Amino acid sequence: MSDQNPNNGAIRNASALGAPKMFILGIQHLFAMFGATVLVPAITGLSVSATLCFAGLGTLLFHVITGMKVPAFLGSSFAFLGAYALVGSAGIPIQYCCFGVAIAGLMYLVLAAMFKIFGAAKVMRYFPPIVTGPIIIAIGLTLSATAIGSASSNWAVALVAIVVVVACNIWGKGMVKIVPILLGVVASYVAAMIFVPDARALLVEKVSAAAWIGLPVHWEDTALSIFGKDFDGGMLLTAIITIAPISLATIVEHIGDVCAISSTVGQNFVADPGLHRTLAGDGIATAVAALFGAPANTTYGENTGVLALSKVYDPQVIRLAAVFAIILSFSPKFAAIVGAMPAATMGGVSLILYGMISAVGVRNVVENQVDFTKSRNVLIAAVILVLAIGLKYGTGTVEGIAFSIGEINIHLSGLAVAALVGIIMNAILPGKDYEFGVNPQGDESADFGRVGE
């Protein structure tokens, strides 16, 4: 991550290009993040309008906190999809899940303070690839049944999405390679509209009933709305305990993204503005978004791909894309189009995305050259994977561990238990050998958002 720019022809002041070209560059970044960002609310049932609004606002907030230096866009994080599904399967309303995600966002601030006080190498010693890699693998695997269930509603429609995503990702050039998820969604959606009458009728019904202009956020959809007469402390505690530990994986993802952006742009953002500021920006943006009913935010690898493609590294172009996202969020009719997306379309792209999450975990372990000849590493990985998957599928009607403290009922997902046990095992077992910063390629590998590579 040299401070010298290794790329010839790089543009760091986009204003010199003129307003029309800046506008086009902003639109390009909007399209790069668009497919993955709107897919998360489509899968979880969260508001598409709120998602776009707080992706834009979160990005602007991140830029302010990081001194307007880092050309990063914050879109919806896939890492929390499993948590929404697990908590929802326990009968807990999604507003409680959002509050749990907000607490996960605040955990970024704790890590940011630790990074500032102790330095990255000492803090990351407790979150090595032997812990984060298997957790990331488990996140994808525990979501697999959801993807198959949605795709099975119409395998032909789902197959269109799968084929287009794979083809664009392998053989696509330029922007086609950067936005394969978006193209897969569009192709599958169009196929459903042509060949599935029920899907076409649902689209017409939803779009005709939606207004052209409206507010992106409604009080009943926010996390703050839970503090009413029907408030349930047990549900809230369960949501927090289940969801908050996932932030350990997303923090590693964030660090990988910042390293990747630094490498692409040729500026050491790990040093200036520093990981403590980028983590704080990401965490606060996530907490704010979740409180208002939007998914967690994360720095997007897709937009890093656009930086590498265009060689325009000016952060103000990213901020322009953020403004476009906010403007688009005020159109309920657009949100209705996304809301009418066939389940099979979501299943097809989810099948690819969830598999890629697990593959990222494998890459994280491989690129960091984790030594599996050591018994400690084998044991940690084994326990994490078995707990995460076994508690998801092997406990009958209850997914995870449920228990009561007094009158409060608490539910821990397999992922939450696996993450906590993995961190504790790594801390107490002898033979720790991971040091952050020694292998930059490995440190950059934990990235859920890099679906265009």
Image (spheres, helix red, strand yellow):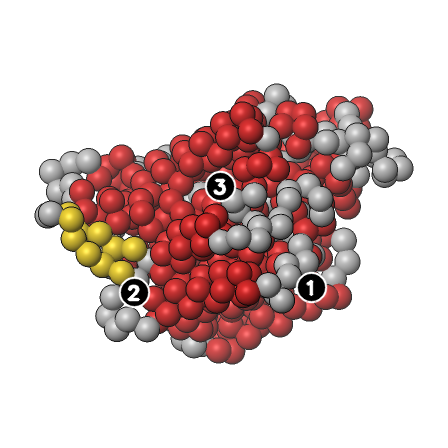
Which sits earlier in the primary sequence, circle 1 or circle 3? 1
Q: Position of residue 5 (x, y in %)?
A: 83, 33
Q: Is residue 158 above or below residue 137?
A: below
Q: Confirm or deny contact between disc 2 and disc 1 (CB under 8 A).
A: no
Q: Which residue reaches farthest front?
A: 430
**SS class, disc 3:** strand
User: Which of these two is toward me, 118 or 408?
Assistant: 118
Mark 1 is surrounded, within 10 Å at the Cα level, by few (under 14), some (14 to 19) or many (20 or more) other residues, namely: many
Pointer 1 residue: 168
User: Which of these two is toward me, 1 or 220?
Assistant: 1
Question: What residue sits 55% from the left and 65% below the top?
Answer: 375
Nearer the camera: disc 2 or disc 1? 2
Question: What residue sits 59% from the left and 30% below the top?
Answer: 119
Q: Is residue 45 above or below residue 163?
A: above
Q: Is residue 315 above or below residue 6?
A: above
Question: What residue sits 59% from the left and 63% below the top?
Answer: 374
Pointer 2 residue: 399
Mark 3 is surrounded, within 10 Å at the Cα level, by few (under 14), some (14 to 19) or many (20 or more) other residues, namely: many
Q: What distance separates the C-alpha of mark 2 from that of mark 1? A: 36 Å
Pointer 3 residue: 297
**SS class, disc 2:** loop
Name the amino acid type tagged 3.
Asn
Mark 2 is surrounded, within 10 Å at the Cα level, by few (under 14), some (14 to 19) or many (20 or more) other residues, namely: many
Name the amino acid type tagged 1.
Cys
Nearer the camera: disc 1 or disc 3? 3
